[in-house]
Amino acid sequence: MKISQSSDHPVAASTTAASSAAKSGPTASTLANTTASKSTQSAGVAVSVSTLARSMEASSRGEAPDVDMEKVNAVRASIAQGTFKVNPEAIADKLLSNAQEMLTRSRG
């Protein structure tokens, strides 16, 4: 089943096929898909994707990312000119606040 397919039917996944695909790379993925299809009846876990998840995925495909291209071009130009200054304190502060936010989410 393709990810972009829209149906509420459960899909079985074979853990053996998935692990062999991860180990061997792209050529094994074709083999893994074939193996997963053949072993659907014998082993696997039923998975279904909710309608909400599908609508979120569909809406994110249609939207352009929020990127300030003017700022990107300004930073790109200052890097090219060698005038871009890195602020290590601002980077450290942002890293710490992001880590604190992730810890708060995982505890709550």
Image (cartoon, rainbow, N blue to C red):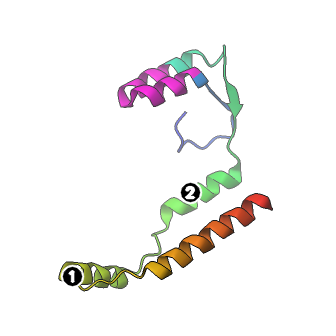
Sequence-wise, which precedes: disc 1 or disc 2?
2
Q: In this image, 64 relative to 50: left or right? A: left
Secondary structure mostly taken by the magenta-highlighted segment of the chain: helix
Q: In this image, 10 relative to 37: left or right? A: right
> In the image, what residue occupies the spot 63% across and 56% down?
55
Q: In this image, 93 relative to 51: left or right? A: left
Identify residue for label 1. 82
Look at the image and give the residue range highlighted in magenta: 16-34
Which residue type does callout 1 highlight? Gly
Extreme residue toward the left, this view: 81
Quadrant of the rendering where the N terminus is positioned: top right
Q: Please check the rendered image and state whether residue 30 is part of the magenta-colored stretch, yes or no.
A: yes
Give coordinates of residue 5: x percent, y percent. Answer: 55, 41
Q: Do labels 1 and 2 touch, CB within 8 Å?
A: no
| Neighbourhood count class around disc 2 (C-alpha, 10 Å): few under 14, some 14–19, many 20 upward | few
Indicate which disc residue 58 carries. Answer: 2
Extreme residue toward the right, this view: 108
Looking at the rendered image, the disc whose residue lies closer to the viewer, 1 or 2, is 1
- Distance between mark 1 and mark 2 Cα atoms: 41 Å
- Nearer to us in this view, 106 or 28: 106
- Nearer to us in this view, 98 or 56: 98
Give coordinates of residue 9: x percent, y percent. Answer: 69, 35
Q: Is residue 14 visible?
A: no
Indicate which disc residue 38 carries. Answer: none
Q: Is residue 87 visible?
A: yes
